[in-house]
Image: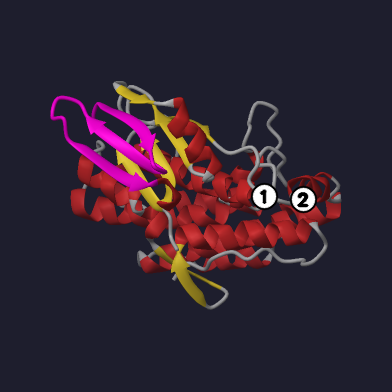
Amino acid sequence: MIKRTLYFGNPAYLKTNNEQLVVEMHGTGETKSTPIEDIGLLILDNQQITITQALLSKLLANNTAVISCDDTHHPSGMLFNLDGNSLQSQKFKAQVEASVPLKKQLWQQTVMCKIENQAALLQHEREEYKLLLTYAKDVKSGDSENHEARAAAYYWKRIFPDFLQFRRERYGPPPNNLLNYGYAILRALVARSLTSSGLLPTLGIHHRNQYNAYCLADDIMEPYRPFVDKVVCQIIRGNGKFLEMTPNMKKALLEIPAMDVQADGQKSPLMNAVQRTTASLAKCFEGKSRKILYPELS
């Protein structure tokens, strides 16, 4: 069953009762409830939201990812369960002891799939894409020749309409804001799935920033980024260059966890595909498999 994504953008009081998330809306007195077991992602996007410790504890026990947004309405922090799998210490040990050659091979697979998905999106947008397929085939162990960066330079020049004069910069003009928001949701989904698969989101196979608590999440989300880009392309088609965040744009981005993706011939919501990906990664660390299961953008 796909877990629900709940978004709160107005003042509210969140508490728990009978294993339910109970919402009391400020000013209206309106009360709603949702079973906690159904919630996969909770986004808090108002400075006047109050949430009880009892509810936070139950959300984390359910392996719900909780995202807090700042006063500019952009995600600024994430909260996750520290005990997401019954065999956690065993899986941690396998992850920590993973060999360098294995991690390089896993990163090779990750980069190849990311570039292939970028090529598929360019093709979908009727842009020239075949060079990216060449780059994908040429990726070596550990991506020693940095084909990921070469592909990115080619991809970002072509994926959005020319009138946007787009440059991918975190704090750059729109649609960077839309990409950042979508990637934050994706990052939370991946980190949540990693913990439920018994893995440490901090220990990456490629990313190694000592100040980054989610290096592995940043690694594993790479092939999924083009799915976010696809949603942003759809938003641009409907809004032209007027891309300051609106409720409708945010709604489209919040539906990313439920969008259909194809992996190994099986169609499923993106959130479920991410769980299959992280489960396959755990098997790689344990020596039970040599291949990560990633989705294919079509």
- Tell me the residue at 26%/51% (across/down): 236
Are there few (<14), some (14-19), or many (20+) residues within 10 Å of tag 2?
many
Q: Is residue 34 magenta?
A: yes
For label 1, the residue is 85
Amino acid under label 2?
Answer: Lys
Residue 129 position in % (x across, y down):
48, 66
- Tell me the residue at 36%/32% (across/down): 15
- Tell me the residue at 34%/55% (across/down): 231
For label 2, the residue is 91
Labelled pair 2, 1 in contact (Cβ < 8 Å)? yes
Q: Is residue 21 magenta?
A: yes
Main secondary structure found in the magenta portion: strand
Q: Which residues are magenta?
A: 9-35
Q: Nearer the viewer, residue 125 or 182?
A: 182
Res. 208 visible in picture? yes
Q: Secondary structure at mark 1?
A: loop
How far is disc 2 from disc 1 in space, using C-alphas? 9 Å
Q: Nearer the viewer, mark 2 or mark 1?
A: 1
Residue 233 position in % (x across, y down):
32, 54
